[in-house]
Image (spheres, rainbow, N blue to C red):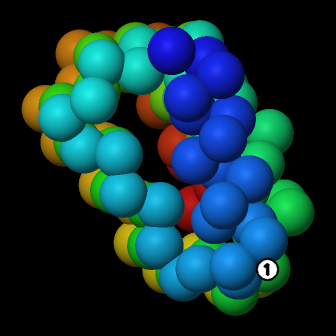
């Protein structure tokens, strides 16, 4: 699964796409960490759709921490993931 995520993200970076769409894919926190690592290389990225991906707090924290480096991201959808208050500090830092 990680190789598929990496291939998809390479395509997003190479094509300078404005959106990452992975909703309903069971990428989990390890996949979210891959997405987080790629965010700073996705110039022009405006939207990240990661709804219902089984992302837990550690994956969300990685995303929130990396997104602080993005100048273009406007929307991140993490709905329907099992997040708790454990990731809220990273979210507050992002905001």
Instruction: Write down the residue under mark 1.
Output: 43
Q: Is residue 84 left or right of residue 33?
A: left
Q: Quadrant of residue 26?
A: top left
* Closer to the camera in the image, 84 or 26: 26
> Between 2 and 66, which is closer to the camera in this rendering?
2
Q: Is residue 65 visible?
A: no
Indicate the position of residue 83 as horizontal and vertical percent values: 31, 20
Residue 41: where, in percent of width, then height?
Answer: 86, 63
Which quadrant would residue 71 be assigned to in this image? bottom right
Report if residue 17 is visible in the image.
Answer: yes
Where's residue 76, x and y in %? 40, 60
Give the residue drawn at x 64%, y 65%.
12
Q: Residues within 10 Å of mark 1 (few under 14, many from 20)?
A: some
Q: Nearer the viewer, residue 49 or 61?
A: 49
Picture coordinates of residue 29, whole percent (x, y): 51, 15
Q: Residue at x 54, y 82 (%)?
A: 18
Marks counted in the figure total 1
Which residue corresponds to the image point at 61% horizontal and 17% vertical from the top-left?
Answer: 2
Q: Is residue 45 above or below residue 48?
A: below
Q: Is residue 54 above or below residue 71?
A: above
Question: Quadrant where the C terminus lies?
Answer: bottom right
- Which element carries disc 1, helix, strand or loop? loop
Left or right of residue 43, residue 91 in this image: left
Q: What residue is shown at x 66% (from left), y 41% (from top)?
A: 7
Q: Is residue 44 above or below residue 86?
A: below
């Amino acid at each position: 699964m990680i190789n598929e995520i990496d291939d998809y993200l390479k395509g997003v970076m190479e094509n300078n796409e404005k959106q990452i769409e992975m909703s309903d894919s069971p990428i989990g926190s390890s996949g979210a960490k891959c997405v987080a690592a790629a965010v700073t290389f996705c110039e022009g990225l405006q939207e990240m759709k990661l709804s219902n991906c089984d992302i837990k707090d550690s994956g969300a924290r990685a995303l929130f921490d990396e997104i602080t480096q993005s100048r273009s991201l406007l929307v991140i959808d993490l709905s329907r993931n099992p997040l708790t208050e454990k990731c809220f500090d990273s979210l507050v830092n992002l905001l």
